[in-house]
Image (cartoon, grey):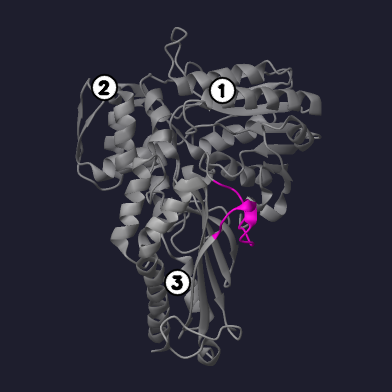
Amino acid sequence: MRAAVTGVTGYVGGRLVPELLAAGHEVRAVSRDPARLDGRSWASQVERVAADVSDLEAIRDALRGADVAYYLVHSLGTGRTFEAVDRRNALTFARAAREAGVGRIVYLGGLYPDVPEGELSAHLASRKEVEEILLASGVPTAVLRAAVILGSGSASFEMMRYLTERLPAMTTPRWVDNRIQPIAIRDVLRYLVGAASLPAEVSRGFDIGGPDVLTYREMMHRYASAAGLRRRVIVGVPVLTPRLSSHWVGLVTPVPSGIARPLVDSLQHEVVCREDDIRGFVPDPDEGLVGVDRAIELALTRIHDGEVTTRWSSASLPGAPSDPLPTDPDWAGGSLYVDERRTVVDAPRDVLWRVIEEIGGQGGWYSWSLAWRARGLLDRLVGGPGLRRGRRDEHRLRVDDVLDFWRVEAIEPGERLLLRAEMKLPGLAWLELRVDEAAAEVTDRDDDGPALEDAAGPGRTYFAQRALFHPQGLAGQAYWWSVAPFHGVVFGGMQRNVAQEAERQARRSTS
C-alpha cells in the first residue's frame, strides 16, 4: 500500500516510517520542510513531499493517490490556543483526505474516560474533538486511543524518568493514585501498521493499552526498581494544582511546562481501556504485549546504548524560527550582527570535527559554564526550552536534531555545523562552526599569532566560528548590545577550548 505519513519529524511519526517500510508499504513522508529528514536512515527509501496540514491545497496534493493517510500531528505546547489550532488542522486534513480519494485515515489520539462533557482536561477534550472530526470526514477512519506511551524519548517516559531519578522523596498531586494503562511504543507502532489493512467497512475508535493496569505511583516505583534506585517516598497532597504541578515538572525534568501542563492535566483522569476490539483485527504477537517492566527495561537499554532514534523534542518547538541563515546584512531589511572568530588548530581535520560534533548535552559548550547555565535558566523562566533538552545522541548529529536550546539547521560532515537558536529571543540567532584545511584567504589572527595562511599545514586545521543575530525592534537591539561584552568570554572561550581539546586528543592519539 502507499502510506502518506504526517508528523514524520515527531516522536511517533519518525519511528512509524521504518516500520511501514519493513511491512512492505511505500511511504510518502509529508513535512513542512523535507530537508529536515536528511540524516534519517530511511530518508532515501521514501518519497518526500513538502506540505503543511493547515494548507488545504498543499495537503490535498500530498495525499493524492495514498491508500492510507496517517494523522500524527498536534499542537501540544503551543499555549492556550492549541485546541483551536488542532480543530482547524483536523478539519482541513479531513477535507483534503476526502477530496484526494484517500482510502483510510489512521489517527493516534488520547485514551479518555467516560465523564460528563466539560470535565475532560483540555488536552483530552481536544484529542476527542479531533477524533470526531476525522470519523465524520466520509473517509474510513481508525482512531487508536492511547494513554501513557512508554518508550525511550517519549515525553511521558522522560517526565516519569526524571521525576523518579532526581527526587528520592516527593510530594505529588492526588492523581498519582489514579489508575492508568500504559502501552509500550513498539505495541503502538504495531497497531498503527496493522490499522492500515483494516476492512473498508471499519470506521471507529479503538482503545489500545498494555497488559498492566496500575497507578502512576506504582509506575514510578517500577521505574526505580528497574533503574536500580532506592524505593522512592511519594506523598500525595491535595493542594498541588495542575498548574503548579506542571511548573514543578518543568523545573525538575527536561519537559517544558508548556508540554507538561496538558500531560499533567490528563493524569487527573483514570484512563483504562474499556474494550480491546483492536486485537480482533491486529492479533497479539506470539510473545504477548509488552508489560510495564519490560517496556522500562527496553527504554533504559536504548538510552544507555545511545540508540534513541526519536525524542519528544524531535518536533519543532512551537513558535521557534525556521528562517534560513541570512547571507546579507540587509536581510529582511534590518541589521545583522555577527561575532566571527577563527584560528588554526594543531590537530587533523577529523579530530577537530569530532570535538565539534560532540558539543552540548552532557559534554557542555567548552566555555564559561556558569554563563551557559544562567542563560539556560533564564530561558526556562520565560517559557523557553533552556538547556534541559540535551541531545539525542552524544556523539553524532543529524539535521533537525535538538542540541540544548539550539536545533541543527544544516550539517556537512567534517566541514560545517549550523545551529539555529530556539531559546526565547527578541530576534533570530544562529551559530555556525566550520572546519577547513585551507585558510589562504585569512591573513591575521586574534591572538597576534602567526598568519593563518602560514600556520596552516600538514596536520593542522582551520577552525571558523560565527554567531549571527538578527534583532527584532528596539528590544532586539538592546539585547545584542547588553550581551556583546560577554562574547569574548563565551564565544572566544568556546573556540579556544574546542581547539585545545582537539589538540589534546590529537596528541593522545599520536602517543
Q: Which mark is residue 478?
A: none
Residue 144 image position (x, y, % from top left): 57, 26
In the rendered structure, are the residues bearing label 2 and label 1 in contact, judged by CB atoms less than 8 Å apart? no
x 43%, y 83%: residue: 506
Residue 160, image quadrant = top left
Q: Which residues are magenta?
A: 321-336
Sequence-wise, the earlier of marks 2 and 3 is 2
Mark 3 lies on residue? 355
Sequence-wise, the earlier of marks 2 and 1 is 1
Q: Nearer the viewer, mark 2 or mark 1?
A: 1
Residue type of the residue flagged with mark 2: Arg
Residue type of the residue flagged with mark 1: Ala
Residue 295 image position (x, y, % from top left): 42, 40
Residue 398, image quadrant = bottom right
x 63%, y 56%: residue: 331
Residue type of the residue flagged with mark 3: Val
**Is residue 405 visible in the rendered structure shown here?**
no
Q: Which mark is residue 174?
A: 2
Mark 1 lies on residue? 84
Q: In the picture provided, is 379 more to the left or to the right than 106?
A: left
In the image, farthest residue toward the front: 474
Residue 255, image quadrant = top left
Q: Nearer the viewer, residue 367 or 313?
A: 367
Residue 15 image position (x, y, % from top left): 57, 44
- Whole-number angstrom distance, CA of label 3 to CA of label 1: 44 Å
